[in-house]
Image (spheres, rainbow, N blue to C red):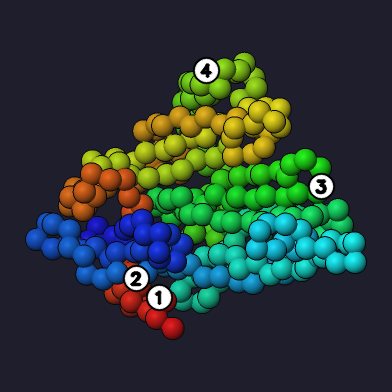
Amino acid sequence: MTAVIVWQQDDKAQGGFRSSWVERIADKPEVKGERPGIIAVSSTSIWSLGTTIVKGCSQYAFDANGEVVVRNGQPVRVNPELEMPELVRAEDGKRVAPWKDGHGYPTVGTQCESSLEEYSVRVVFEGGMGPFVVASVNTYTNHGGAHGIRGQNLVSIDLDAGKAVDLGPPEKDKAALAKAAAAGLSVELKEVQPAGVVLMYGPLGAGLALYRFSAYAPYVGGLGGNSYSNDFVVSSKSLPVELERYQKLPAWVVPHLNGKSRMVFMVPPARLSAFRRQFDAAYSK
């Protein structure tokens, strides 16, 4: 492996990260280029972050003070448009956004729910490893009453397959991880449910998995990503089976980590030239 793409957190950049192209020069990492957004690599393709406009469902209009706008005694409704992120494949423009289906869109089938008063959807990319990227989908919906409902789902995307997949710990480690989560949540083991995984590399270049578990909680007491759940995260060096081959970074990459966890994507040597051209072209228009 002679080149990698590394995400470096930058809140001002598109998607919250900037991407560096890092090459192996005299057995040391050297940055050869940077782009101001998310760029991810699978064994067959390079992807960047794009956006699309999604027509919103009718909801209440709010003024600058956060109050519902009222005219002629009735709340004013608007039909907002959401600018939603998508991963875009460089060579053909294929778009992947699995959070569109069942994650935060306030619809029944294709119809908007008429009782909806307020909602929002936000996607945040949490990390990646090998051909996988992990995103959290954060939602808020309000159908009236005292409180709205917040939700958070973690979505793992297989860039080789171009779709969402379920990533879990190896079978031999599931029981111990769930037991640790039950203890952390102070619930019975049977009440614990897996709730996704975040993938990253530690400062010494070893792969890390943050397995999230959840348990039901009364709405007023829910402290997790969802209004009716409490969450607990178990850090583990046990990666999902699909990622075992990416367990450790090449030694030459490690000095580039600077003591911080990073999202690192390997550039296949056979695709080095083609991917570099696509990297340089990303976000250039």
Relative to 35, does residue 170 appear above or below in the rendering?
above
Q: Quadrant of residue 162?
A: bottom right
Please state which amino acid type lies under the numbered disc 4: Ala
Residue 66: percent from left, percent from top: 68, 57
Relative to 196, does residue 67 appear above or below in the rendering?
below
Please state which amino acid type lies under the numbered disc 1: Ala
Chain-order first, disc 1 or disc 4: 4
Of the two numbered discs 3 and 4 in the rendering, the one whose residue sits closer to the viewer: 3
Cα separation, mark 2 vs mark 3, equals 43 Å
Mark identifier at residue 183: 4
Mark identifier at residue 35: 2
Please state which amino acid type lies under the numbered disc 2: Arg
Left or right of 169, for residue 230: right
Query: Which residue is pictured at 21% across the width and 65% down the height?
Result: 31
Cα separation, mark 1 vs mark 2, equals 7 Å
Please state which amino acid type lies under the numbered disc 3: Gly
Mark identifier at residue 252: none
The number of numbered discs placed on residues in the rendered structure image is 4
Mark identifier at residue 144: 3
Cα separation, mark 3 vs mark 4, equals 35 Å
Mark identifier at residue 282: 1
